[in-house]
Amino acid sequence: MYRKVKGFRDIFGSEAAAWERVERAFRDTFHTFSFSEFVLPVLERTEVFNRGIGSTTDIVEKEMFAFEDRDGTQVALRPEGTASIVRAYVENKLFNPPEVKKYFYMGPMFRRERPQKGRFRQFFQAGVEVFGTSAPALDAEVIHLLDTLAVNAGIGDMVTMEINSIGCPACRPGYQEKLLNYLREHSSELCEDCVRRLDRNPMRILDCKNEKCKGVTSEAPVMLDHLCGDCVEHFDNVKEYLDDFGVEYSVNKMMVRGLDYYVRTAFEMVTTSLGSQNAVGAGGRYDGLVKLLGGPEIPGIGFALGIDRFVSLLMLKEEVEEQKADVFVIAFKDVSDRKAVQLLRWFREKGIKTLMDYDMRAMKKQMKKADQSGARFTLILGEDELEKGEVSVKDMHSGGQELVQIDKITDYISDKLG
């Protein structure tokens, strides 16, 4: 028997039903916020991620599915969406004419990390990217969007929002020097990964989950206490707009982004319901990334969220049932099979979910199948009914049954379904 590759999985049944509900809520919400969909390639040149994510990050160093194509090109399955969409924004010159552009994307991402509970080698993300303004009102709107996605997907009460400011090129260098001096004094207490990060990416150490490192960083200087005047004003404005949007949040001084093109606003949606995998979505402002990938100096902000984790939270909260039919049609071979097929077409043209027993077995077996289908109504097309131009309709909820003219059946069912 063939088996799936380690770290990959099949999604079906009630999980697929929950997945469909979450993705439908996402699309409706993105459109309400006037975001346009961007469909990205799954495969990119490796240099896009080396440049966009950072060659010293764990994702690029250890976790990418990267390989050499037949023509010698180094390519990789995308581990995240931001670098890809910025590459596409620059390559397609979407900065002309200059205006604010708002995009969303959804799809699979790939990381060759050790599979564990809640973490897969193929996982699914939805995200947004906005280009063209550094206004704090936009930062607040993007955070409001992430908050609204959780509410509309039915998990708003299972998550909380955390925000921070990580400064800008004017105030961050001075802070990083103080942080580095502090961390070097405690380097013997840091984990192996954080010792490696000391000279490459010291701010990432503040985000380490190792208990020893958390003990060290609990006393470390934080960026929020070293912001310049412009960054203080920007962060204050973001918080004011969030209050106006009605978004509840807390300030997490330890939240960081380890790459230089990230500036000012950073945010995360977290949960306590998924064990160690507490991050559900995260984002921030990256005003230097468009230029880094070959474009003009254009500010940007975005976030990515784990669709898998939204689905897991929804399934913890409630039992999501697979979609059921509205109508089940019972027919008999060489008697009413042609009319039954015609009815299926009529119902589906009106958006009414319809099933039938294609083998057209004995009446008793078809009734059993109709009951198992969960359909609200069962339609019986027997020889007597057809001769009178009627169909027998059984309400599977109430048990009531009545005859309805065939040419009026679609309107009758539509009215009943409301």
Image (cartoon, rainbow, N blue to C red):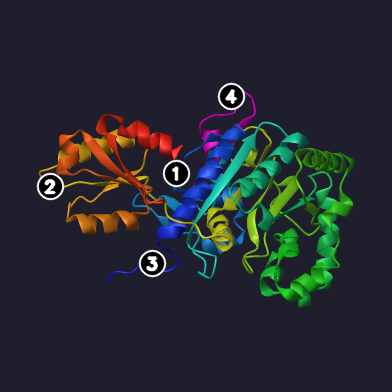
SS of the residue under disc 2: loop
* Rendered image: mark on residue 41: 1
> Circle 2 is placed at which residue position?
333
Point out the stretch of residues depicted in magenta: 88-106
Q: Identify the secondary structure beneath mark 3.
A: loop
Task: State the CA–CA distance, disc 2 to disc 3.
Answer: 44 Å
Q: Determine the CA span between mark 4 and mark 3.
A: 43 Å
Mark 2 Cα-neighbour bin, 10 Å: few <14, some 14–19, many ≥20 = few
Q: Amino acid at mark 1?
A: Pro
Give the Cα separation between the discs numbered 1 and 4.
22 Å
Of residues 413 and 27, which is closer to you in this image? 413
Does residue 344 appear in the picture of this structure?
yes
Residue 96 circle label: 4
Circle 4 — which element?
Answer: loop
**Percent coordinates x, y for residue 15 in the rendering:** 46, 59
Residue annotated with mark 3: 5
Does the image show residue 350? no
Determine whether label 1 and label 4 are within 8 Å by CB. no
Give amino acid for label 4.
Answer: Asn
Horizontal side of residue 302 vs 239, given as left or right? left
Identity, as a three-letter code, of the amino acid under mark 2: Lys
